[in-house]
Image (tube, rainbow, N blue to C red):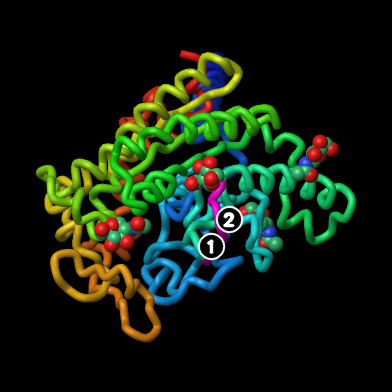
């Protein structure tokens, strides 16, 4: 027979075990999702556009999207982008483009990024300049419009809209705001035959605009910011092919030293801007993410990580050193531009953008904070406050 005392002890032990279990579960839960971001709002260019540009302009053609989506999915890659892996990591849906009116679900955020998008306004239309009219300032107007309209529709129309729109009331202050823009502003100068010095001369203007965009989101209630710097333009076949005069002097990775100088200068200034914002806005958390370092690691050690020549285009045309022809691009319906057999072994998808495999590699490098300032993981990006 078990004594009453023994029974009480057992019950107490069980209770303690239960309480300990609850505490551990709660720790695991908060460990798992310490910030609990309910949504992502993204601003950027083609490296994070999930459908804005093709919602307005000609659709993306096969073989874009073939690896993951099995069809073109608005992305300039064979599959997912860094922003997709980020959403997945935070337990959120892949972001739909704000401009994509059919079948979109914005309950967990919206994407304002546009392929060919820039920080500065572009002179001329897409047809004359080749750049998107959806520059950063336009993306911010769209964000404001998104918040205003979804508040109105959610509260006053309701119905089916409550299943596809967020209730922005608490979302705005809790969401993660991500930025990945500036690469096209730099490319614009280089493609215009500017020297690195000439490109660097307008970087302060880019910084002023980017800083003011972030400040605007802050004024609208945003508090958590994740700012990607810009990638290795000098390691992209299109940069190398457009500026043969600057492609001559290469580093050990085969990248143009001059064409990477602009991005490096931009990134150094951007890091200062983010540091300044961190001091000026102590209520907000800012994470500066060195995407350039992740991308450069991939470019310089591609073989070690199971990739082929990182400068050789998978979905390209013409053979040669890069298999890239600036007039015959990936998906060209007449002349080809077909995918290589195994894109998962390629870094460069179309000479401008990377493959899903390359974006996954970059995501893996940045997700745990190893390349961030402060070094907080993505899931803890609400904690990078005022230091
Ligand atoms: C557009 O043109 C204006 C006036 O000439 C000039 O100041 C501005 O820098 C140009 N913008 C770009 C992105 O080149
Ligand atoms: C959103 O609403 C606010 C407050 O009603 C207003 O000040 C702002 O101009 C609106 N923005 C847009 C883009 O409609
Ligand atoms: C939109 O996404 C949310 C979150 O994943 C989901 O709960 C909701 O059912 C979706 N809406 C529709 C119409 O599928
Ligand atoms: C840049 O220079 C090259 C070689 O001189 C020339 O072919 C090209 O048209 C120039 N591009 C622009 C935009 O001026």
Magenta-drawn segment? 120-127
Tell whether 151 sits left or right of 329.
right
Instruction: Residue 219: give x, y in percent of width and height.
Output: 68, 27
Towards the viewer: 63 or 176: 63
Which residue does the numbered mark 1 point to in the structure image?
126
Ligand 2 positioned in quadrant: top right
Which residue does the numbered mark 2 point to in the structure image?
133
**From mark 1 to mark 2, how far is it between C-alphas?**
7 Å
Query: Quick check: marks 1 and 2 in contact, CB under 8 Å?
Result: yes
Element assignment for label 2: loop
Instruction: Residue 124: give x, y in percent of width and height.
Output: 56, 57
Instruction: Residue 207: give x, y in percent of width and height.
Output: 48, 31
Towards the viewer: 306 or 127: 127
- How many marks the image carries: the answer is 2
In which image quadrant can residue 147 be found? top right
Few, some or many C-alpha atoms within 10 Å of disc 2 (few <14, some 14-19, many ≥20)? many
Element assignment for label 1: helix
Q: Is residue 79 above or below residue 256?
A: below
């Amino acid at each position: 027979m078990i004594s009453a005392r023994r029974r009480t002890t057992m019950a107490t032990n069980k209770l303690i075990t239960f309480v300990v279990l609850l505490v551990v579960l709660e720790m695991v839960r908060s460990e798992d999702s310490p910030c609990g971001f309910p949504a992502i709002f993204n601003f950027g260019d083609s490296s994070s556009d999930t459908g804005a540009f093709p919602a307005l302009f000609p659709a993306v053609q096969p073989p874009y999207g073939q690896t993951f989506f099995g069809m073109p999915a608005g992305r300039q890659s064979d599959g997912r982008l860094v922003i997709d892996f980020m959403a997945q990591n935070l337990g959120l849906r892949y972001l739909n483009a704000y401009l994509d009116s059919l079948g979109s679900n914005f309950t967990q955020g919206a994407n304002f990024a546009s392929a060919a998008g820039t920080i500065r306004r572009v002179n001329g239309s897409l047809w004359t300049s080749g750049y998107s009219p959806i520059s950063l300032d336009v993306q911010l107007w769209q964000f404001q419009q998104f918040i205003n309209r979804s508040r109105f529709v959610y509260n006053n129309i309701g119905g089916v809209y409550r299943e596809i729109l967020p209730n922005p009331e608490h979302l705005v202050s809790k969401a993660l705001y991500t930025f990945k823009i500036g690469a096209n502003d730099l490319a614009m100068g280089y493609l215009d035959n500017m020297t690195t010095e000439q490109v660097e001369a307008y970087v302060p203007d880019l910084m002023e605009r980017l800083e003011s965009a972030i400040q605007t989101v802050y004024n609208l209630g945003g508090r958590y910011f994740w700012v990607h710097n810009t990638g290795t333009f000098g390691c992209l076949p299109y940069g190398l092919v457009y500026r043969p005069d600057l492609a001559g002097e290469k580093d050990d990775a085969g990248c143009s030293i001059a064409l990477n100088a602009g991005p490096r200068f931009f990134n150094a200034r951007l890091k200062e801007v983010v540091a300044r914002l961190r001091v000026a806005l102590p209520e907000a958390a800012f994470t500066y993410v060195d995407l350039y370092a992740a991308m450069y690691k991939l470019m310089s050690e591609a073989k070690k990580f199971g990739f082929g020549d990182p400068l050789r285009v998978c979905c390209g045309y013409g053979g040669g050193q890069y298999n890239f022809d600036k007039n015959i691009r990936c998906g060209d319906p007449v002349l080809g531009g077909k995918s290589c057999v195994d894109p998962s072994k390629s870094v460069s998808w179309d000479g401008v953008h990377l493959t899903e495999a390359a974006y996954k590699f970059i995501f893996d490098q940045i997700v745990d904070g190893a390349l961030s300032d402060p070094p907080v993981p993505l899931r803890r990006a609400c904690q990078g406050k005022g230091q």
